[in-house]
Image: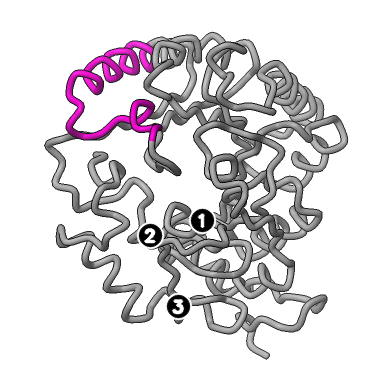
Amino acid sequence: MTKNSVSAPGSEFRGPGFWETLKEAFLGARRLLDCIQVEVTSRCPGRCTYCPHTTRKEDWQPRDMEMATFGRLWPLMRRSGRVHLQGWGEPLLNPAFFEMAALARKAGCQVSTTTCGLRMDDTLADAIVASGIDIVAFSLVGTDAESNAPRRGVDFERVCTAIATLQAVRRQRMGVHLEIHVAYLMLASTMEAVAGLPALMQRLGVHAAVVSTLDYLPEPGLEHEAFAPAESAKLARAGEILKQTAAAARGLGLGFHYELPDPDAAGTNCRENIRRSLYIAADGSVSPCVYVNVPVNTADPARRVFGNVRDQDPVAIWENADFRRFRERLACGDPDLPCQGCPKRYMR
Protein backbone atom coordinates (compact mmCIF):
# COMPACT_ATOMS: atom_id res chain seq x y z
CA MET A 1 0.00 0.00 0.00
CA THR A 2 1.40 3.43 -0.94
CA LYS A 3 1.44 6.22 1.59
CA ASN A 4 -1.47 7.97 -0.14
CA SER A 5 -3.63 4.87 -0.20
CA VAL A 6 -6.81 4.68 1.84
CA SER A 7 -7.24 1.48 3.76
CA ALA A 8 -10.08 -0.23 5.53
CA PRO A 9 -11.86 1.39 8.52
CA GLY A 10 -9.83 1.18 11.71
CA SER A 11 -6.45 0.71 9.99
CA GLU A 12 -3.57 3.17 10.35
CA PHE A 13 -2.71 5.93 7.88
CA ARG A 14 0.93 6.59 7.20
CA GLY A 15 1.96 10.18 7.70
CA PRO A 16 3.79 12.21 5.07
CA GLY A 17 7.33 11.00 4.47
CA PHE A 18 10.36 12.85 5.83
CA TRP A 19 11.68 14.03 2.46
CA GLU A 20 8.22 15.04 1.30
CA THR A 21 7.72 17.15 4.41
CA LEU A 22 11.19 18.66 4.11
CA LYS A 23 10.57 19.61 0.48
CA GLU A 24 7.33 21.37 1.33
CA ALA A 25 8.92 23.20 4.26
CA PHE A 26 11.99 24.51 2.44
CA LEU A 27 10.82 24.81 -1.15
CA GLY A 28 7.37 26.17 -0.35
CA ALA A 29 5.64 23.64 -2.58
CA ARG A 30 2.11 24.86 -3.24
CA ARG A 31 -0.64 22.34 -2.73
CA LEU A 32 -3.34 21.69 -5.30
CA LEU A 33 -6.14 23.11 -3.13
CA ASP A 34 -6.38 25.91 -0.61
CA CYS A 35 -9.17 24.30 1.40
CA ILE A 36 -11.42 21.27 1.69
CA GLN A 37 -14.71 21.95 3.46
CA VAL A 38 -16.09 18.82 5.08
CA GLU A 39 -19.62 18.39 6.42
CA VAL A 40 -18.95 16.52 9.66
CA THR A 41 -22.70 16.32 10.34
CA SER A 42 -25.95 17.81 9.08
CA ARG A 43 -27.51 17.59 12.55
CA CYS A 44 -27.97 20.89 14.38
CA PRO A 45 -29.76 22.03 17.56
CA GLY A 46 -30.45 25.47 16.10
CA ARG A 47 -33.62 26.64 14.36
CA CYS A 48 -32.25 29.67 12.55
CA THR A 49 -34.92 31.44 10.51
CA TYR A 50 -32.71 31.78 7.41
CA CYS A 51 -31.35 28.21 7.29
CA PRO A 52 -32.75 25.32 5.20
CA HIS A 53 -32.36 23.09 8.27
CA THR A 54 -35.35 25.08 9.59
CA THR A 55 -37.23 26.09 6.46
CA ARG A 56 -36.99 22.59 4.91
CA LYS A 57 -37.09 20.56 8.12
CA GLU A 58 -39.67 18.08 6.74
CA ASP A 59 -37.23 17.07 3.99
CA TRP A 60 -34.00 17.32 5.97
CA GLN A 61 -31.54 14.40 6.09
CA PRO A 62 -29.82 14.29 9.50
CA ARG A 63 -26.57 12.39 9.05
CA ASP A 64 -23.04 12.12 10.44
CA MET A 65 -19.98 11.49 8.32
CA GLU A 66 -18.40 8.15 9.19
CA MET A 67 -14.70 8.01 9.96
CA ALA A 68 -14.22 5.53 7.12
CA THR A 69 -15.65 8.10 4.68
CA PHE A 70 -13.44 10.84 6.08
CA GLY A 71 -10.43 8.56 5.73
CA ARG A 72 -11.10 8.32 2.02
CA LEU A 73 -10.12 12.01 1.79
CA TRP A 74 -6.49 11.29 2.67
CA PRO A 75 -5.09 11.68 -0.90
CA LEU A 76 -6.96 14.98 -1.24
CA MET A 77 -5.92 16.25 2.19
CA ARG A 78 -2.28 15.63 1.27
CA ARG A 79 -2.89 18.12 -1.56
CA SER A 80 -4.75 20.77 0.46
CA GLY A 81 -3.57 23.52 2.76
CA ARG A 82 -6.58 23.51 5.08
CA VAL A 83 -9.48 21.28 6.13
CA HIS A 84 -12.52 23.14 7.44
CA LEU A 85 -14.75 20.81 9.46
CA GLN A 86 -18.25 22.21 9.08
CA GLY A 87 -21.15 22.03 6.67
CA TRP A 88 -24.89 22.33 7.28
CA GLY A 89 -24.78 21.15 10.91
CA GLU A 90 -23.03 21.54 14.25
CA PRO A 91 -19.69 19.73 13.77
CA LEU A 92 -19.03 19.04 17.46
CA LEU A 93 -22.03 16.68 17.52
CA ASN A 94 -20.05 14.06 15.60
CA PRO A 95 -18.30 11.72 18.07
CA ALA A 96 -15.42 11.29 15.60
CA PHE A 97 -14.75 15.03 15.30
CA PHE A 98 -11.37 15.00 17.04
CA GLU A 99 -10.27 11.83 15.26
CA MET A 100 -10.99 13.59 11.98
CA ALA A 101 -9.10 16.69 13.06
CA ALA A 102 -6.12 14.54 14.02
CA LEU A 103 -6.04 12.79 10.65
CA ALA A 104 -6.26 16.11 8.79
CA ARG A 105 -3.32 17.45 10.78
CA LYS A 106 -1.40 14.24 10.12
CA ALA A 107 -1.90 14.95 6.41
CA GLY A 108 -0.14 18.29 6.93
CA CYS A 109 -3.25 20.49 6.85
CA GLN A 110 -4.30 23.36 9.03
CA VAL A 111 -7.67 22.61 10.61
CA SER A 112 -10.55 24.93 11.45
CA THR A 113 -14.21 24.66 12.37
CA THR A 114 -17.32 26.79 12.92
CA THR A 115 -19.63 26.07 15.85
CA CYS A 116 -22.83 27.42 17.38
CA GLY A 117 -21.17 27.07 20.80
CA LEU A 118 -23.98 25.23 22.59
CA ARG A 119 -21.83 22.22 23.51
CA MET A 120 -18.89 24.19 24.87
CA ASP A 121 -17.65 23.47 28.38
CA ASP A 122 -14.23 23.21 30.03
CA THR A 123 -13.73 19.59 28.95
CA LEU A 124 -14.54 20.28 25.32
CA ALA A 125 -12.48 23.47 25.32
CA ASP A 126 -9.51 21.54 26.68
CA ALA A 127 -9.88 18.95 23.90
CA ILE A 128 -10.01 21.69 21.25
CA VAL A 129 -6.84 23.36 22.49
CA ALA A 130 -5.04 20.01 22.77
CA SER A 131 -6.12 18.99 19.25
CA GLY A 132 -3.97 21.57 17.49
CA ILE A 133 -6.94 23.12 15.63
CA ASP A 134 -5.84 26.63 14.67
CA ILE A 135 -9.19 28.43 14.21
CA VAL A 136 -12.54 28.01 15.96
CA ALA A 137 -15.25 30.39 14.73
CA PHE A 138 -18.51 31.04 16.57
CA SER A 139 -21.62 31.90 14.53
CA LEU A 140 -23.60 35.07 15.26
CA VAL A 141 -26.10 37.26 13.42
CA GLY A 142 -26.23 40.01 16.04
CA THR A 143 -24.30 41.66 18.83
CA ASP A 144 -26.98 41.42 21.51
CA ALA A 145 -29.91 39.15 22.27
CA GLU A 146 -32.38 41.20 20.22
CA SER A 147 -30.37 41.41 17.00
CA ASN A 148 -29.26 37.77 17.33
CA ALA A 149 -32.88 36.58 17.70
CA PRO A 150 -33.07 34.99 14.19
CA ARG A 151 -30.70 32.31 15.55
CA ARG A 152 -33.57 30.59 17.32
CA GLY A 153 -32.53 27.91 19.76
CA VAL A 154 -29.05 29.43 20.09
CA ASP A 155 -29.14 31.82 23.04
CA PHE A 156 -26.87 34.84 22.58
CA GLU A 157 -25.51 34.85 26.14
CA ARG A 158 -24.85 31.11 25.90
CA VAL A 159 -22.65 31.75 22.85
CA CYS A 160 -20.80 34.53 24.68
CA THR A 161 -20.20 32.17 27.61
CA ALA A 162 -18.92 29.51 25.19
CA ILE A 163 -16.42 31.95 23.67
CA ALA A 164 -15.26 33.08 27.11
CA THR A 165 -14.85 29.45 28.20
CA LEU A 166 -12.67 28.54 25.23
CA GLN A 167 -10.63 31.71 25.67
CA ALA A 168 -10.02 30.98 29.35
CA VAL A 169 -8.84 27.42 28.64
CA ARG A 170 -6.73 28.61 25.73
CA ARG A 171 -4.93 31.10 27.97
CA GLN A 172 -4.55 28.61 30.80
CA ARG A 173 -2.97 26.06 28.47
CA MET A 174 -1.00 28.73 26.58
CA GLY A 175 -2.59 27.61 23.33
CA VAL A 176 -0.99 30.35 21.26
CA HIS A 177 -1.66 28.38 18.05
CA LEU A 178 -5.45 28.77 18.44
CA GLU A 179 -7.37 31.79 17.18
CA ILE A 180 -10.97 32.45 18.16
CA HIS A 181 -13.08 34.08 15.45
CA VAL A 182 -16.66 35.23 14.96
CA ALA A 183 -18.43 34.13 11.78
CA TYR A 184 -20.95 36.95 11.53
CA LEU A 185 -23.91 36.83 9.15
CA MET A 186 -25.13 40.36 8.52
CA LEU A 187 -28.86 40.44 7.79
CA ALA A 188 -30.18 43.53 6.03
CA SER A 189 -32.94 44.20 8.59
CA THR A 190 -30.41 44.49 11.42
CA MET A 191 -27.32 45.68 9.57
CA GLU A 192 -26.64 48.41 12.17
CA ALA A 193 -26.01 45.77 14.83
CA VAL A 194 -22.64 44.90 13.28
CA ALA A 195 -21.30 48.18 14.68
CA GLY A 196 -21.31 46.58 18.12
CA LEU A 197 -18.96 43.80 17.02
CA PRO A 198 -15.57 45.39 17.90
CA ALA A 199 -16.58 46.02 21.52
CA LEU A 200 -18.00 42.51 21.82
CA MET A 201 -14.86 40.99 20.32
CA GLN A 202 -12.63 42.92 22.69
CA ARG A 203 -14.72 41.90 25.72
CA LEU A 204 -14.63 38.20 24.81
CA GLY A 205 -11.05 38.02 23.56
CA VAL A 206 -11.98 37.27 19.93
CA HIS A 207 -9.09 37.65 17.50
CA ALA A 208 -10.96 38.30 14.25
CA ALA A 209 -14.40 38.53 12.66
CA VAL A 210 -15.47 37.54 9.15
CA VAL A 211 -18.70 39.22 8.06
CA SER A 212 -20.77 37.60 5.32
CA THR A 213 -24.24 38.20 3.91
CA LEU A 214 -27.22 35.96 3.19
CA ASP A 215 -26.28 34.60 -0.22
CA TYR A 216 -28.36 31.42 -0.14
CA LEU A 217 -32.13 31.85 0.11
CA PRO A 218 -33.72 28.55 1.19
CA GLU A 219 -37.25 29.77 0.49
CA PRO A 220 -39.08 32.78 -1.00
CA GLY A 221 -39.67 35.66 1.39
CA LEU A 222 -36.12 36.10 2.64
CA GLU A 223 -34.98 38.39 -0.17
CA HIS A 224 -35.27 41.46 2.07
CA GLU A 225 -32.54 40.04 4.32
CA ALA A 226 -30.05 39.61 1.48
CA PHE A 227 -27.90 42.05 -0.48
CA ALA A 228 -28.34 41.72 -4.23
CA PRO A 229 -25.80 43.34 -6.60
CA ALA A 230 -28.51 45.63 -8.02
CA GLU A 231 -29.55 47.03 -4.62
CA SER A 232 -27.23 50.02 -4.76
CA ALA A 233 -28.79 52.07 -1.94
CA LYS A 234 -28.84 49.12 0.46
CA LEU A 235 -25.28 48.21 -0.44
CA ALA A 236 -24.06 51.78 0.02
CA ARG A 237 -25.58 51.97 3.47
CA ALA A 238 -24.15 48.60 4.49
CA GLY A 239 -20.76 49.53 3.04
CA GLU A 240 -20.52 52.68 5.12
CA ILE A 241 -21.47 50.84 8.33
CA LEU A 242 -18.93 48.10 7.63
CA LYS A 243 -16.18 50.58 6.73
CA GLN A 244 -16.62 52.41 10.04
CA THR A 245 -16.85 49.15 11.99
CA ALA A 246 -13.72 47.78 10.35
CA ALA A 247 -11.82 50.95 11.29
CA ALA A 248 -12.99 50.62 14.91
CA ALA A 249 -11.95 46.96 15.06
CA ARG A 250 -8.53 47.58 13.57
CA GLY A 251 -8.03 50.47 15.99
CA LEU A 252 -8.38 47.87 18.75
CA GLY A 253 -5.88 45.58 17.04
CA LEU A 254 -8.59 43.13 15.93
CA GLY A 255 -8.94 41.40 12.58
CA PHE A 256 -12.04 42.39 10.62
CA HIS A 257 -12.90 41.08 7.16
CA TYR A 258 -15.97 41.65 5.01
CA GLU A 259 -17.15 41.66 1.43
CA LEU A 260 -20.29 42.96 -0.23
CA PRO A 261 -21.57 42.33 -3.76
CA ASP A 262 -20.15 44.78 -6.28
CA PRO A 263 -22.45 45.50 -9.24
CA ASP A 264 -19.41 46.41 -11.34
CA ALA A 265 -17.64 43.09 -10.76
CA ALA A 266 -17.27 40.82 -13.78
CA GLY A 267 -19.10 37.89 -12.21
CA THR A 268 -16.33 35.48 -13.19
CA ASN A 269 -14.97 34.83 -9.71
CA CYS A 270 -16.45 33.29 -6.56
CA ARG A 271 -16.07 34.07 -2.88
CA GLU A 272 -16.21 30.31 -2.23
CA ASN A 273 -12.96 30.04 -4.22
CA ILE A 274 -14.21 27.04 -6.21
CA ARG A 275 -11.08 27.07 -8.38
CA ARG A 276 -9.01 25.95 -5.39
CA SER A 277 -11.51 24.44 -2.95
CA LEU A 278 -14.33 21.93 -2.80
CA TYR A 279 -17.02 20.59 -0.49
CA ILE A 280 -17.59 17.04 0.72
CA ALA A 281 -20.99 16.30 2.27
CA ALA A 282 -21.51 13.88 5.15
CA ASP A 283 -22.50 11.11 2.72
CA GLY A 284 -19.22 11.49 0.80
CA SER A 285 -20.65 13.35 -2.19
CA VAL A 286 -18.38 16.01 -3.72
CA SER A 287 -19.59 19.43 -4.84
CA PRO A 288 -18.11 22.85 -5.62
CA CYS A 289 -19.64 24.42 -2.49
CA VAL A 290 -22.08 23.84 0.35
CA TYR A 291 -24.89 25.73 -1.40
CA VAL A 292 -25.24 23.22 -4.24
CA ASN A 293 -25.40 20.16 -1.97
CA VAL A 294 -28.17 20.74 0.58
CA PRO A 295 -29.07 17.48 2.40
CA VAL A 296 -32.78 17.19 1.59
CA ASN A 297 -34.83 14.23 0.41
CA THR A 298 -36.69 16.10 -2.33
CA ALA A 299 -35.35 16.83 -5.82
CA ASP A 300 -33.22 19.96 -5.92
CA PRO A 301 -32.52 21.46 -9.38
CA ALA A 302 -29.57 23.38 -7.91
CA ARG A 303 -27.81 20.27 -6.63
CA ARG A 304 -24.46 19.55 -8.28
CA VAL A 305 -22.51 16.43 -7.31
CA PHE A 306 -19.48 15.23 -9.29
CA GLY A 307 -18.73 11.97 -7.51
CA ASN A 308 -18.58 10.25 -4.14
CA VAL A 309 -15.38 9.54 -2.22
CA ARG A 310 -16.81 6.31 -0.81
CA ASP A 311 -16.29 4.59 -4.17
CA GLN A 312 -14.07 6.98 -6.16
CA ASP A 313 -10.63 8.50 -5.80
CA PRO A 314 -11.25 12.06 -4.52
CA VAL A 315 -8.39 13.51 -6.59
CA ALA A 316 -9.87 11.91 -9.72
CA ILE A 317 -13.25 13.50 -8.88
CA TRP A 318 -11.62 16.94 -8.67
CA GLU A 319 -9.90 16.39 -12.00
CA ASN A 320 -12.80 14.82 -13.91
CA ALA A 321 -14.03 16.58 -17.04
CA ASP A 322 -17.47 17.59 -15.73
CA PHE A 323 -16.11 19.16 -12.56
CA ARG A 324 -13.38 20.92 -14.52
CA ARG A 325 -15.98 22.26 -16.98
CA PHE A 326 -18.10 23.59 -14.09
CA ARG A 327 -15.16 25.65 -12.85
CA GLU A 328 -14.15 26.81 -16.30
CA ARG A 329 -17.67 28.01 -17.14
CA LEU A 330 -17.68 30.33 -14.14
CA ALA A 331 -14.27 31.72 -15.09
CA CYS A 332 -15.53 32.39 -18.64
CA GLY A 333 -18.65 34.25 -17.50
CA ASP A 334 -21.03 31.45 -18.52
CA PRO A 335 -21.75 29.79 -15.14
CA ASP A 336 -23.93 26.77 -14.54
CA LEU A 337 -27.55 27.42 -13.47
CA PRO A 338 -27.02 27.35 -9.66
CA CYS A 339 -24.33 30.05 -9.92
CA GLN A 340 -26.11 32.41 -12.27
CA GLY A 341 -27.99 34.37 -9.60
CA CYS A 342 -25.50 33.92 -6.77
CA PRO A 343 -24.22 37.19 -5.24
CA LYS A 344 -20.93 35.47 -4.39
CA ARG A 345 -19.96 35.85 -8.07
CA TYR A 346 -19.85 39.62 -7.58
CA MET A 347 -17.48 39.80 -4.62
CA ARG A 348 -14.06 41.34 -5.16
What residue is shown with label 3? 317
What residue is shown with label 1? 294
Q: Which mark is residue 302?
A: 2
**Front-most of residues 111 and 193:** 193
Range covered by the magenta-colored residues? 221-247
Q: How many numbered marks have been drawn onto this rendered protein structure?
A: 3
Measured in 3D between alpha carbons, the distance from the residue under mark 2 to the one under mark 1, in whole angstroms, is 9 Å
Type of the residue with mark 2:
Ala
State which tag comes first along the sequence, 2 or 3.
2
Magenta stretch encompasses residue 198:
no
Q: Nearer the viewer, mark 1 or mark 3?
A: 1
What type of secondary structure mainly makes up the magenta span? Answer: helix
Magenta stretch encompasses residue 237:
yes
Type of the residue with mark 1:
Val
Number of residues whose C-alpha sits closer than 10 Å to that of mark 2, classed few (under 14), some (14–19) or many (20 or more)? some
Quadrant in which the C terminus appears: top left
**Front-most of residues 53 and 5:** 53
